[in-house]
Image: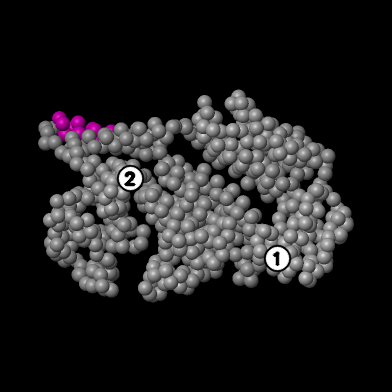
């Protein structure tokens, strides 16, 4: 019962959040209001049945507000204020849903939020109009402790106004005193009082040198409810919710079926058995395709959650940033989606905080004051590409190289741009001098790289000065059953993911040379690092004569390398199985492998992690 409640409420909350973010600037249509009302009503009813009075009372108050504006279509509301208020409702419910999974869960206190909604509803009913004012104060020279005096000003005004923001933002910071001395203290408030009333209250502030109160026009966000506007969905797709555990079990069965097919294929049997084998192979392919399609989900859910991330971060640091979404119906494996949220949040946080300039800097560069982030997904070959583009200042190559040289990560500044930009994924690497609440600790892009790698993906970074940065992630369509190339090295057999293999050749098509103290392969006027697989894994009896071996040109997240093996055997579908964590700890060499598989003869083969080689 609890699982069903959590699932359904999460679905409703996601839909609510999407509507609120869309209507913040465009206003509420009749359909929007009805949809929000229905969602609140449903959550109220189901939470009441579960005995969750805090959520039930909160959604009841929100339901009453939307019932009023639904029944009074000509009432004037502020889209931004409503969005801020109801998003706080959404956040409270989200927090409660997460907490419910703990055995020691106790209901949160939503009374303060219920009262706030009721007060706002009454103010709308009475037609009270809050105005927004910008207050700019300078203190006398030598007043000292300007940040403390700024706190005093806020305490004086808070009984008659809502404080929206302050500059400087953090008055606890010691540097805020110097900022106030140089630029004055600026804060934005909302109040139903007039300009003269605000001035009269602040006029008695001690050590006040000058006071300026200016009303801020907000006509772009204030709209009447538009009862003629109808948003019609461009698709009507029906989805069946399936428990992930059942899908995993079904996937394991399919995996065993693939292994059984492989066993049957090795047996030297008559025509009847060959016919049966062909039929089994056909059914296996069909069943595999069906299971994979069930596991595929559109990226729209996680993409739309990023709208809230961009909105909240941009408002926090005072920037105007638009998020543009493309390819949201592109489908990807559910396991990849589960691992994608954290990397996307880190990437977008960096774009908002570091990448996109503030309005003044953008204007001096001839850009629009409003920045833009593009979040895009599309299929390319056998991969799903998810990319984040921003139109900000771009990465500073010189600063990255300088930092990398000081950390000993590189020995020369003369390296390609893609290698320079990939240095920001190194643990602890950061060129930001000041640590902020959002970033600067050198952990963000390292987390991104590790999470993408965990999901079987690859990461590429491109950037141009003052034009922006692109973070491009590539993932396989599925992580469960893949095509693998079997290779022999001495007495062992390994698997290389076919997706990474670009070419298989011998030394008659290439030449061996040494550059910078390491062995390289020259193929068609291109140089590639050479890796002897038997040498790396200390395999017994591997072929040491490269002219009697075969070479695989493979692509990894750092470029392309040549892997030397004794023989390339065949290509086949393989079932990917994880390597137990305790084995990875006990045997360090296993870190060169990403997973394992069971072959048709029952033997276990290790799957090479091509990203482990440089």
> Main SS of the magenta segment?
helix
The answer to which image quadrant residue 187 occupies is bottom right
Image x and y of residue 500, in percent? 30, 55
Image x and y of residue 570, in percent? 20, 49
Q: Specify start and end residues of the magenta stretch as a single range.
A: 272-283
User: Residue at 78% of width from left, 44% of height from top?
Assistant: 76
* Nearest to the observer: residue 54 or residue 509: 54
Image x and y of residue 16, in percent? 61, 39
Q: CA distance from mark 2 to mark 1?
A: 52 Å
Q: Residues within 10 Å of mark 2 (few under 14, many from 20)?
A: few
Residue at the spot of label 1: 177
Image x and y of residue 526, in percent? 28, 69
Q: In the image, which is nearer the foreground, mark 2 or mark 1?
A: 1
The answer to which image quadrant residue 121 occupies is top right
Whether residue 227 is visible: no
Residue at the spot of label 2: 581
């Amino acid at each position: 019962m609890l699982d069903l409640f959590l699932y359904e409420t999460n679905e409703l909350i996601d839909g609510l959040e999407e509507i609120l973010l869309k209507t913040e600037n465009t206003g509420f249509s009749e359909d929007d209001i009805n949809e929000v009302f229905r969602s609140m009503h449903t959550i109220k009813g189901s939470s009441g049945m579960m005995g969750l009075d805090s959520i039930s009372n909160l959604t009841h108050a929100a339901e009453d507000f939307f019932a009023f504006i639904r029944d009074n279509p000509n009432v004037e509301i502020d889209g931004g204020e409503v969005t801020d208020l109801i998003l706080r409702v959404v956040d409270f419910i989200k927090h409660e849903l997460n907490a419910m999974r703990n055995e020691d869960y106790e209901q949160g206190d939503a009374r303060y939020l219920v009262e706030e909604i009721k007060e706002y509803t009454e103010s709308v009913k009475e037609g009270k109009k809050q105005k927004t004012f910008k207050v700019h104060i300078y203190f006398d020279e030598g007043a000292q402790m300007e940040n403390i005096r700024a706190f005093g000003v806020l305490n004086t005004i808070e009984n008659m106004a809502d404080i929206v923001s302050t500059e400087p933002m953090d008055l606890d910071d010691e540097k805020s005193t110097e900022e106030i001395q140089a630029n004055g203290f600026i804060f934005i408030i909302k109040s139903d009082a007039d300009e003269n009333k605000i001035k009269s209250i602040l006029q008695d502030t001690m050590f006040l040198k000058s006071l300026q109160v200016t009303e801020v026009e907000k006509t772009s966000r204030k709209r009447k409810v538009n009862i003629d506007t109808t948003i019609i969905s461009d698709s009507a797709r029906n989805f069946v919710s399936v428990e992930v555990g059942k899908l995993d079990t079904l996937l394991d069965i399919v995996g065993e079926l693939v292994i059984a097919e492989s066993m049957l294929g090795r047996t030297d049997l008559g025509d009847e058995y060959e016919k049966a084998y062909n039929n089994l192979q056909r059914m296996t392919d069909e069943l595999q395709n069906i299971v994979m399609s069930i596991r595929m989900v559109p990226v729209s859910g996680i993409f739309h959650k990023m709208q809230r991330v961009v909105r909240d971060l941009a408002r926090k640091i005072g920037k105007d940033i638009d998020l543009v979404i493309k390819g949201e119906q592109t489908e990807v494996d559910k396991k990849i989606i589960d691992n994608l949220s954290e990397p996307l949040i880190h990437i977008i946080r960096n774009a908002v905080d570091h990448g996109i300039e503030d309005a003044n800097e953008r204007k001096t560069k001839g850009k629009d004051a409003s920045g833009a982030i593009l979040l895009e997904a599309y299929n390319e070959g056998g991969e799903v590409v998810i990319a984040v583009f921003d139109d900000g200042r771009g990465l500073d190559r010189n600063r990255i190289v300088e930092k990398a040289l000081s950390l000993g990560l590189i020995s020369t500044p003369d390296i390609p741009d893609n290698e320079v930009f990939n240095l920001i994924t190194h643990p602890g690497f950061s060129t930001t001098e000041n640590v902020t609440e959002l970033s600067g600790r050198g952990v963000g892009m390292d987390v991104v790289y590790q999470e993408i790698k965990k999901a079987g993906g690859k990461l590429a970074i491109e950037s141009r000065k003052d034009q922006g940065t692109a973070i491009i992630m590539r993932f396989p369509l599925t992580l469960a059953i893949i095509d693998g190339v079997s290779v022999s090295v001495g007495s062992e057999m390994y698997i290389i993911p076919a997706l990474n293999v670009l070419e298989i050749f011998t030394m008659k098509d290439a030449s061996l040379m040494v550059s910078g103290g390491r062995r390289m392969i020259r193929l068609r006027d291109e140089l590639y690092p050479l890796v002897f697989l038997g040498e790396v894994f200390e395999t017994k009896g591997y072929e040491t004569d490269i002219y009697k071996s075969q070479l695989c040109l493979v692509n990894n997240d750092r470029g392309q390398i040549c892997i030397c093996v004794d023989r390339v055997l065949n290509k086949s579908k393989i079932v990917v199985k994880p390597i137990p964590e305790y084995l990875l700890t006990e045997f360090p060499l296993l870190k060169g492998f990403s997973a394992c598989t069971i072959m048709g003869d029952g033997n276990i083969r290790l799957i090479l992690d091509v990203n482990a080689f440089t």
